[in-house]
Image: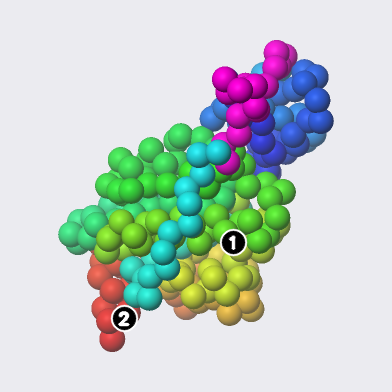
Amino acid sequence: VLCYGNRYAPDQFEAEIPEDLAPCDLAAAGGVAARVIGQHASMALPTRLAPVGLLGDRHGRVVNLSQWALKPSMEHSNRPLTFAVVGSSMNAGKTTTAANLVLGLCRTDHKVGAAKVTGTGAGGDIWLLQDAGGTPVLDFTYAGYASTYRVPPDEIERIFVTLTSHLASAAVDSIVLEVADGLFQEETAALLTTDSFASRVDGIFAAGDALGAAAGVEWLARHGLSVIAISGLLTCSPLAMREAQRATGLPVVDAEGLRSGGLALKSNAAAVA
């Protein structure tokens, strides 16, 4: 049993939900079926699928994830310390950054909730956040979507508010969020420019190189969002870290630094002050 869903992955596949039950493709290994319309040159052809029908309930109604979506939760006046990890592109190191940050927060005796707000449904990312110590860990599938690609902006915002409100209701001390893909991805850009996002998060930016870090920080500043630190794939290179620090004037924190909890302590102290 698979879910139909659109796919946006510049390093893998772009795919769209077909209009009928004609043969289509396994567009994401997490179990998403769609018609692939473009792919990265390094990717092999997707697994071809021959759908046999739509899953229904005992009353003959087609089953949809939205039937089990979380209901809106009560808003909290005092939000927990909230880190949002956004990035320059797919594979910039966002999930690794988020997981190491969760671990670092847990090591400072925080109860940490985590969520992946946008993307394509798959277990790997949320399992990594769980393994790092996050509890609870949610993603957009809990809000009723197999994928957030081509979901209207107001629904993306609703997903974000629903997930963050449920995490806050779990009495966590801090929250770590991951926003999928890069700043130029349409749904990501739409979410980051909402008042809801700006009022709920303290940002961390993940990038693959110093130029991507500098451009990303500039883009976020232009939209009224501040970055408290840079991390991601570029931290594999001490030289790239120095380049990014010189270009942005911001702290550049590698995986070990995130796991140490030092960034969390500094951010918490600043929030209290």
Residue at 58 percent across and 46 percent down: it is 119
Q: Residues within 10 Å of mark 1 (few under 14, many from 20)?
A: some
Question: Residue drawn 66% across and 31% down?
Answer: 4
Magenta range is 50-66
For this rendering, which residue is in front, 208 or 141? 141
**Location of residue 40 in the rendering, given as x and y in whole percent from the top left corner:** 71, 36
Q: Is residue 42 magenta?
A: no
The crowd level at tag 2 (other Cα within 10 Å; few <14, some 14-19, many 20+) is few
Q: In what quadrant of the picture does the C terminus appear?
A: bottom left
- 205 relative to 56, above or below: below
Residue farthest toward the bottom in the current orientation of the protein: 273
Secondary structure at badge 2 equals helix
Please name which of the two marks, 1 or 2, marks the residue nearer to the observer: 1
* Magenta stretch, main secondary structure class: loop
Q: Position of residue 159 (x, y in %)?
A: 55, 55
Q: Which mark is residue 259?
A: none
**Residue bearing mark 2:** 270
Determine if residue 24 is in view: yes
Name the residue furthest front: 59
Name the residue carrying label 1: 157
Q: Which picture quadrant has residue 110?
A: bottom left
Q: Amino acid at mark 1?
A: Glu
Query: CA separation, marks 1 and 2?
Result: 27 Å
Q: Amino acid at mark 2?
A: Ala
Q: Nearer the viewer, residue 225 or 165?
A: 165
Residue 227 in the image, given as x and y percentages of width and height: 48, 72
Question: Relative to residue 265, is residue 175 depicted above or below?
Answer: above
Provide the secondary structure element on which disc 1 rests. helix
